[in-house]
Amino acid sequence: AMAQMLNQRGLRTRQGAEFQSSNIKRMIQHEGYTGYIITKAARSEFMPQLQIIDEALFAKANEMISKRSRKALKDKNAAQKSGNPTLLAGIVVCAHCGAKMSAFLHTDRYKLADGSVREKVQAKYNCYQRGQHLRQCDGQALYLAERVDRIVVAYADELFRKIKSEPYDKSIEQKIRQQEANHNRKKQAAEKKIKAAQYKQQRYEDEVLKCLEGESAFSQEMLARLITQAEAEVRQAKDEYAALLQNNDDRTTVQQIRSYYDEFLGWANEFNLATVERKRVILAQLFEKVEVGKGYKITIHVRGTYKQFLGEEPHGKF
């Protein structure tokens, strides 16, 4: 469908041919769009100026392709040997400067006693901002991905055990209903405030003509100040109402609560047997971010959508 849409718009490939589904698939699977230069022999460090799509969305799109591919069923275990074995793409950040960190395969070289050199290739997370001196950062430049991932997975397992061991708490739904009622009361109060401010503004504006005819108790200067003040009150009241409407769009409904819980429980049941790509997607949806600092001090932030099911949330600092 996407290839057809591009062709209908008159777009063509670099060779001047019409787009085929295979062209679209290659584009979706091209890791270079996430901010890397990819060749057969090497993969560069993360380069933000080249990034078109974030790594979490890239992983999710490719997971969907894998699910739809019959061949993926035969190659289910091939993902375990992927060129990118890391799990935290898109959510791991530097605890010192706040920059997103990238993953790449790093070669360490060790000189042995006999003078020979041994090489060891390991996946690492890299603070690109520090490495390129783009911003002040006193953290480490590189962190072993396997060590960071192991800590985060252990924490995820702890959360999954908790969600599986505790029954669904219907009091969460009651809390949402109370929040809904409170929100509606605030909206009604804000609407009244707008009407009152507008009435005040109109009353002062109606006085202008009387003032010009010498029939008003207000002077022109006083009316000008009162009208300006009333206009400011109207703007403030409308801003408060707009904020409530925005908050209304962002709030969780009772119907969504149950679907979030079922999703969380589903992850708990599938995580241990999932492919690397699937684990990467689950962790990106469960955690808002993972902060990594010197000495492998790690802080894991659970998204609020799922945190509410955990009661007293296990600590996320390591």
Image: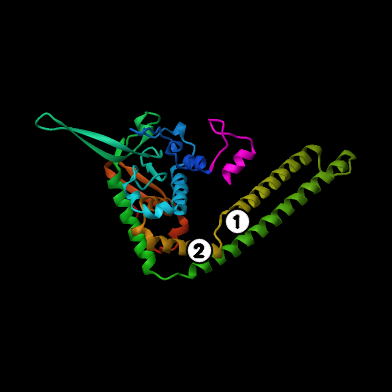
Could you tell me which residue is drawn at 41 percent across and 71 percent down? 167
x, y (%) of residue 117?
16, 31
Labels 2 and 1: the sequence-earlier one = 1
x, y (%) of residue 288?
43, 50
x, y (%) of residue 8?
64, 40
Residue 61 is a magenta residue:
no
x, y (%) of residue 143?
29, 40
Question: Dominant secondary structure of the magenta stretch?
Answer: loop
Residue 4 is a magenta residue:
yes
| Numbered range of the magenta stretch | 1-20
The answer to whether 41 is drawn above or below residue 71 in the figure is: above
The answer to whether 119 is drawn above or below residue 178 in the figure is: above
On the image, which quarter does residue 134 sit in? top left
Could you tell me which residue is drawn at 9 percent across and 32 percent down? 113
Q: Which mark is residue 248?
A: 1
| Residue type highlighted by circle 1 | Asn
Q: Which mark is residue 259?
A: 2
Task: Using the image as rendered, state which of residue 270 and residue 167 is in the foreground.
Answer: 270
